Image (cartoon, helix red, strand yellow):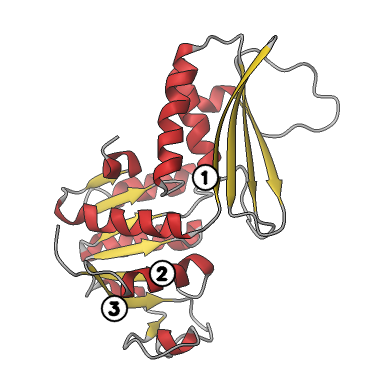
Amino acid sequence: MAENAGIVVTGGSGRMGQMLIRLITASDAARLVGVVERAGHVWVGQDVGVAMGGAPLGVVVTDDPLEAFAKAQAVIDFTSPAATVGFAALAAQARAVHVIGTTGLSTDDLKAIEAAARHAVIVRAGNMSLGVNLLVKLTQKVAAALDADFDIEIIEAHHGQKVDAPSGTALMLGQAAAEGRGVLLDDVADRARDGITGARTRGHIGFSAIRGGDIVGEHDVLFAAPGERIVLRHIATDRAVFARGALKAALWGQDKTPGEYDMMDVLGL
């Protein structure tokens, strides 16, 4: 792992972006070398520390990701699917580790990211926290141990401004449950229910999404059978858990060969 790895944060004005900037500037193993925002954003051209309402940090916000990535060893990206796909190609050109926390990626988006991973390290996860990744592993093991008499429902709650559903973490959990059962998630997922839906299909994995207030992130995996229920739960109360995981991934990826990795790899799970 390279010491004092230079890191670029994309979407620096967002909640996660600002948290990452603070975390990186306080780190002994990383240094902030760039912050990217979309063209026309009020932060572009300003010192990012001043833009955040504090002291100058010596890093000017830019709308040119290629210029920023060229001097970086890693890029941490919690933006939008369209932006992330573009960033993946540019980070691959720069041979920078690309840590992707963006959710809502389509099949085509994932194919583009897979192509970029042939040339650089990409660490992508729907959730960067240690606790959530342990929950994913537990979900897979419990699903493997129980038969289809246990219905599986994934219930997630987030703040009212979240734009995608189910959450990336919920989909990670659904994928883990499907793998535990030896099925494809796309074949058994029930993502929405409205009206006269009929009885639940045996073996299907359901998703329920709650949006409201300032909920950081809550995920339950419910295994329900006649007469008993098992509930696995993770509650995040501070977005710092995601920022810390993303920085850990950026540093972990410094000495790895090109390819696509996830937080299970980073955490050795």
Q: Earlier along the polypeptide chain: callout 2 or callout 3? A: 2
Picture layout, residue 82 above or below residue 235: below
Query: Quarter of the image holding residue 120?
Result: bottom left
Whole-percent x, y for residue 217 in the image: 58, 49
- Amino acid type of disc 3? Glu
Q: Earlier along the polypeptide chain: callout 1 or callout 2? A: 2
Q: How many marks?
A: 3
Give the foreground label among 1 and 3.
1
Graded by Cα atoms within 10 Å as few (under 14), some (14 to 19) or many (20 or more), the crowding at tag 3 reads: some
Left or right, 154 with respect to 21, comes to: right
Secondary structure category for the residue under label 2: strand
Q: Earlier along the polypeptide chain: callout 1 or callout 3? A: 3
Residue 181 vs residue 155, the one in the foreground? 155
Graded by Cα atoms within 10 Å as few (under 14), some (14 to 19) or many (20 or more), the crowding at tag 1 reads: some
Residue at figure coordinates x 58%, y 39% from the top left: 219
Picture layout, residue 264 above or below residue 143: below
Whole-percent x, y for residue 93 in the image: 23, 63
Residue annotated with mark 3 = 67
- Amino acid type of disc 2? Thr
Q: Is residue 194 visible?
A: yes
Residue annotated with mark 2 = 10
Whole-percent x, y for residue 49 in the image: 41, 85
Residue at figure coordinates x 49%, y 48% from the top left: 105
